[in-house]
Amino acid sequence: MNNQNPLSEFLSQLIALFLSLIVVHTIYVTVIHPNADAILEQQATQQAAGKTLDIERSIYIVLKDFEQEACFILALWVFAIMGLKAKKILRERALLSRTLIDISPGTSLLPEDTREYSRPIQNLNETEREYLLPRALLSGLQRFGSTQSIQDVATTVKDICVHESERLDSELSMVRYIIWAIPSIGFIGTVRGIGEALGQAHKAVEGDILGVTLSLGVAFNSTFVALIISIFIMFLMHQLQLLQERLVLDSQRYCDVSLLRHLKAL
């Protein structure tokens, strides 16, 4: 069972996208575009005066095109998505340091004791009860109380952990899509830039190389920026996957140590 309503998660991601759009576009309008326009105007003035054209490799020129802006919007969006997921995982991990089933060493847990040991878990707040560890422990206790089979408890705990692992992995589908989309946007910029450069080839023959240079800059800068962003996002996604996998494995181990080894069938 997922402890977050799908509609609520969708709205959260939509709000994150909207905020990412506002933040990145504001930075582009107030910082990137004005500085890039000033540099381009200076280069145009030099060319009009017949001076040697000084092609400046500025960060503002590298980032100025809408393909790069779109990549940064998607990057900030996916950072927000992964940040929310990482925050939830860390909250779940905090339960691993708490004693949810207080069984003294050497004490056996009989089927008739399951209701008593379930109460501390049932007394957790609604959000915490839906976390992986409480669900696995409570399901294991309930299964032991009804079947009196230790093997059934082990199977129940394992199944819950496996299903949770699959659910967590499926929730990364949007992150994987964005990681694919960002280089694709960069390649669109490459095609657009090369097309514009070819369309201005006759000007280069006449000595006007500024337009061709700018178009080729679009072609290579967009892909360069997109690939750098994708590499960084891929690294963060693997770190998030590692957190998720460790949560599942540590929760299953917690159940083994704190519950399964204390069970005693009649």
Image (cartoon, rainbow, N blue to C red):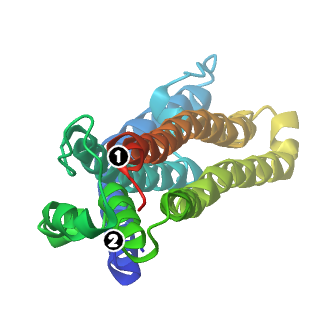
Residue under the point 44% across and 68% down: 148
Whole-percent x, y for residue 153 in the image? 48, 61
Residue under the point 40% across and 56% down: 81
Question: Does 101 appear above or below 177?
Answer: above
Viewer-nearest residue: 150 or 171: 150
Viewer-nearest residue: 41 or 266: 266
Q: Which residue is mark 1?
A: 262
**Other residues around mark 1 within 10 Å, as few (<14) / some (14–19) / many (≥20):** some
The answer to whether 228 appears left or right of 135 in the picture is right
The answer to whether 216 appears left or right of 76 in the picture is right
Whole-percent x, y for residue 143 in the image? 42, 71
Question: Does 149 appear above or below 245?
Answer: below
Residue under the point 49% across and 42% down: 249
Viewer-nearest residue: 14 or 238: 238
Q: Which residue is mark 2?
A: 3
Whole-percent x, y for residue 204 in the image? 82, 36
Whole-percent x, y for residue 124 in the image? 14, 64
Residue type at mark 1 is His
Residue under the point 65% across and 57% down: 181
Report the Cα–Cα distance between label 2 and label 1: 29 Å
Viewer-nearest residue: 69 or 79: 79
Looking at the rendered structure, the secondary structure element under dot 2 is loop
Comes first in the chain, label 2 or label 1: 2
Residue type at mark 2 is Asn
Question: Does 156 appear above or below 84?
Answer: below
